Image (cartoon, grey):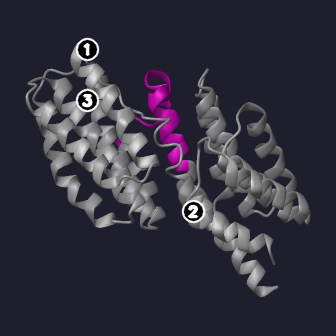
Amino acid sequence: MKKRIILAVSVLVLLALAGGGVYYYWFLPIKIRVKGETYGTLMRCMNEFHTLMRQEKYDEAMTLLKEYRSFLAEIKSPARTQACLYSFTWEHELWYVQKKYEKVKENFPEMERQLGLLRKFDLDTMDLFYAEWMVVKEKARYHYKIGKYHEALGIMDDFLAKNGGEGKWEKSAPELMKFAYRAKADYLMEIGDKEKSEQYIGKAITLCGNNKEFLYGMLLKLARLYCREKDAEKVLKYAKTAHERHESQACYCFLALGCHLKGDNGKAKEYYSLARSCKKPPFVAADVLARLKEMLSE
């Protein structure tokens, strides 16, 4: 029984850690005003990069990223610097998958330098705010990934407070704030503040508009929150609501966990089998699936 509890907790924790990144290639909170060839190259490289990441071709992904930055080096404009900053979010995903967290930390001085270059251009307030946000969110994400959740929350709260507070940017930059609220929900969940975490998930949902993929991610986040509370009914409620919108490997895992928490191991195994065969994102890490299997076999 003790081993079974340990396995259950480890699966929930691993799903929580995976949850910070599984939606990465869907939701990219950055405003880059580029046109023509520059925009086409950005989108092509972004799509190719994430395809390589899903295929675990990390060396090829890094090669593509270097080629993209070489292309950017030939462009002299604020859009070039914005796009260069943006590319660090791709690189960081590469390092996080490989658990090379110090590689992320090493990038922050260069990101600050690029941000300094942007401040020299005649950008409007919103463009500069988005660029500053990108650096802040990456620093907060780094602390989240290494388990320093209070520090991650502090970095984001300080940035928003210095720039007029959440209410100001809810009105002028709702697209950005929904990502900020999603991140804060993660940090609060890890700290153990369920009420505030749920509150920020609700705020993010309010700002999601017609973005069905974002709403889907928030439903899974609610399922994850209640997994931690071991509330089987609510896990299943939100996982099933998400499943009505989209089939995914992560959703099947939450359905399996909800059934397991409810004591229906037969149904949990069915959902686990569906998770194993599902090829639709968001995905979970292979070690999460392995531990889920071990838990259900007890």
Label 1 belongs to which residue?
35
| Residue 93 percent location from the top left of the image | 38, 51
Tell us which disc is closer to us: 3 or 2: 2
Horizontal side, residue 147 vs residue 193: left or right: left
Q: Choose between 254 and 181: the one closer to the eye.
A: 254
Q: Is residue 36 placed above or below 115 in the rendered structure?
A: above
Q: Amino acid at mark 1?
A: Lys
Q: Choose between 84 and 158: the one closer to the eye.
A: 84
Identified at 10% across, 25% down, the residue is: 75
Q: Is residue 212 placed above or below 181 in the rendered structure?
A: above
Instruction: Please report the bounds of the magenta region as a residue range.
Output: 162-184
The Cα–Cα distance between marks 1 and 3, rounded to whole angstroms, is 19 Å
Residue 112: in magenta span = no
Tell us which disc is closer to us: 2 or 1: 2
Number of other residues with Cα within 10 Å of mark 2, as a class: few under 14, some 14 to 19, many 20 or more: few
In the rendered structure, which disc, 1 or 3, sits on the residue that comes first in sequence?
A: 1
Outermost residue toward the bottom in this view? 2
Tell us which disc is closer to us: 1 or 3: 1
Label 3 belongs to which residue?
128
Q: Is residue 198 among what the camera can see?
A: no
Which image quadrant for residue 241? top right
Q: Choose between 124 and 294: the one closer to the eye.
A: 294
Q: Amino acid at mark 2?
A: Ala
Identified at 33% across, 28% down, the residue is: 44
Helix, strand or loop at mark 1: loop
Label 2 belongs to which residue?
286
Horizontal side, residue 20 vs residue 289: left or right: left
In the rendered structure, which disc, 3 or 2, sits on the residue that comes first in sequence?
A: 3
The Cα–Cα distance between marks 3 and 2, rounded to whole angstroms, is 39 Å
In the rendered structure, which disc, 2 or 1, sits on the residue that comes first in sequence?
A: 1
Q: Amino acid at mark 3?
A: Leu
